[in-house]
Image (cartoon, grey):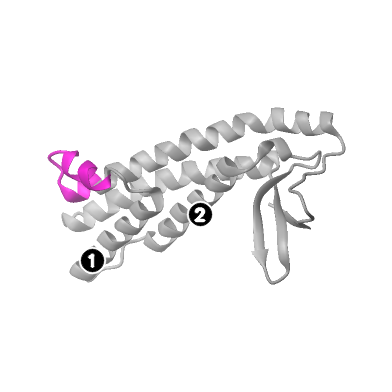
């Protein structure tokens, strides 16, 4: 995904030259946005299930009490702490662990870009306002170009990460129960 910065000048303004082309772009992007939201929520549910099973496999209630008000990144950090402790205790490194953590965090970063983007500011080239950056250079408006291809890649990463989480957890259980 390409990004561009535009110097902030007095008012937060987004220049869109070809409104019809921008509208067409949004019409094509909308299904991907919905799928990203829907499948990210499924990924988070899968993460919840994995964490609940870590507390006890008899009921999800104990885990759900702990997870109740936690955000996604806190859940990923909790998974990391559980897995780090497990690996130390087993004196074994779990296959796919580092990549899974990177992908879980990247899914959240990309999902947040998509969900919190100001889609009404999308221009004819697909650049969408995502945030105001403040630095020594002053205030700059940041835009990300969400193409259909990049949105598809985000969606595919979320689906693959969910599958990898299932496989990782099965591998962890195999190690735990001596099946690996």
Count how many numbered circles sit on residues in the image: 2
| Helix, strand or loop for the magenta stretch, by majority | helix
Say few, some or many: other residues with alpha carbon within 10 Å of mark 2 (under 14 / 14 to 19 / 20 or more): some
Position of residue 180 relative to residue 156, above or below, is below
Q: Quadrant of the C terminus?
A: bottom left
Residue, x 69% and y 46% (percent of image)?
129
Residue, x 22% and y 58% (percent of image)?
175
Q: Secondary structure at mark 2?
A: helix
Q: Position of residue 80 (x, y in %)?
A: 32, 60
Position of residue 158 relative to residue 175, above or below, is above
139 vs 79, left or right, is right
Name the residue nearer the viewer: 12 or 166: 12
Image mark for residue 29: none
Say few, some or many: other residues with alpha carbon within 10 Å of mark 1 (under 14 / 14 to 19 / 20 or more): few
4 vs 93, left or right, is right
The residue positioned farthest toward the front in the image shown: 10
Q: Position of residue 177 (x, y in %)?
A: 16, 54
Q: Is residue 79 visible?
A: yes
The residue beneath circle 2 is: 106
The residue beneath circle 1 is: 85
Q: Position of residue 105 (x, y in %)?
A: 46, 55
Name the residue nearer the viewer: 51 or 127: 127
* Residue 53 inside the magenta-drawn segment: yes
The residue positioned farthest toward the left in the image shown: 58
Q: Secondary structure at mark 1?
A: helix
CA gap between label 2 and label 1 equals 23 Å
Q: Is residue 180 visible?
A: no
Q: What span is in magenta?
A: 52-67
Q: Position of residue 11 (x, y in %)?
A: 76, 49
């Amino acid at each position: 995904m390409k990004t561009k910065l535009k110097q902030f000048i007095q008012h937060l303004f987004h220049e869109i030259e070809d409104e019809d082309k921008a509208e067409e772009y949004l019409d094509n992007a909308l299904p991907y946005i919905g799928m990203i939201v829907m499948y990210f929520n499924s990924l988070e549910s899968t993460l919840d299930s994995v964490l609940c099973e870590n507390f006890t496999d008899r009921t999800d209630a104990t885990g759900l009490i702990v997870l109740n008000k936690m955000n996604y990144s806190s859940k990923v950090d909790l998974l990391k702490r559980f897995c780090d402790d497990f690996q130390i205790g087993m004196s074994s490194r779990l296959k796919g662990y580092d990549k899974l953590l990177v992908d879980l965090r990247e899914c959240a970063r990309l999902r947040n870009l998509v969900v919190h983007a100001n889609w009404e500011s999308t221009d004819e080239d697909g650049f969408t306002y995502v945030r105001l950056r403040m630095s020594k250079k002053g205030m700059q408006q940041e835009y990300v170009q969400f193409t259909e291809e990049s949105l598809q890649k985000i969606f595919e990463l979320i689906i693959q990460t969910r599958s990898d989480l299932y496989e990782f957890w099965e591998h962890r259980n195999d190690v735990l129960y001596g099946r690996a």
